[in-house]
Amino acid sequence: MKKAYIFSMLFWGLFASCKNDGYHKIGPEEARQMMKETADFILLDVRTESEYRETRIPDSRLIPDYEIGARAHSELPDKNAVILVYCRSGRRSAGAARKLAKMGYTQIYDFGGIMNWPYETVKSREE
């Protein structure tokens, strides 16, 4: 029974890292590595403006998930660009990644939520 459980977890772990619904699901470590190794990428935050102002990953660009359909074509014109997507916990980033893939974007990588991001963030100061 225990072997079957371990095998199942390994299988689903491998499956989750594969392309699904037209986008790739990756973890924060892989996203960080891609940022180091990829010369040109877009780091896309799909949370609300107030969440973005509070804390964000450096050099990220904000397009809230509910505005992807209206703003992606003008703000993300290269459909072959590497786009790394995140939100707070991973739910909105998955939905936004799925929308972008359906719109024809080809290199979408969802790395989940900022709450699981162990690297540098920028916090806005209260004024």
Image: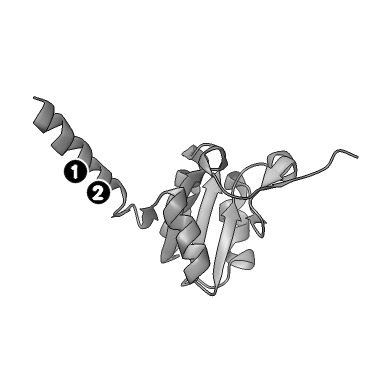
Name the residue type under label 1: Phe
Proximity of marks 1 and 2: CB atoms separated by less than 8 Å: yes
Residue at position x 42%, y 51% in the image: 98
Residue 100: mark in rendering: none
Q: Which residue is mark 2?
A: 14
In the image: residue 107, left or right of residue 18: right
Viewer-closest of 26 and 70: 26
Which SS class for mark 2? helix
Instruction: Give how far across and how far down residue 28 sits, in percent.
Output: 47, 49
Which SS class for mark 1? helix
Q: Which residue is mark 1?
A: 11
Crowd tier of the residue under label 2, counting other residues whose Cα lies within 10 Å: few below 14, some 14–19, many 20 or above: few
Q: Quadrant of the C terminus?
A: top right
Instruction: Give how far across and how far down residue 117 sits, in percent.
Output: 54, 44
Name the residue type under label 2: Leu
Instruction: Give how far across and how far down residue 77 sits, in percent.
Output: 57, 71
Instruction: Give how far across and how far down residue 64 sits, in percent.
Output: 63, 47
Residue at position x 57%, y 46% in the image: 65
Viewer-closest of 47 and 79: 47
Q: Quadrant of the N terminus?
A: top left
In the image: residue 53, left or right of residue 91: right
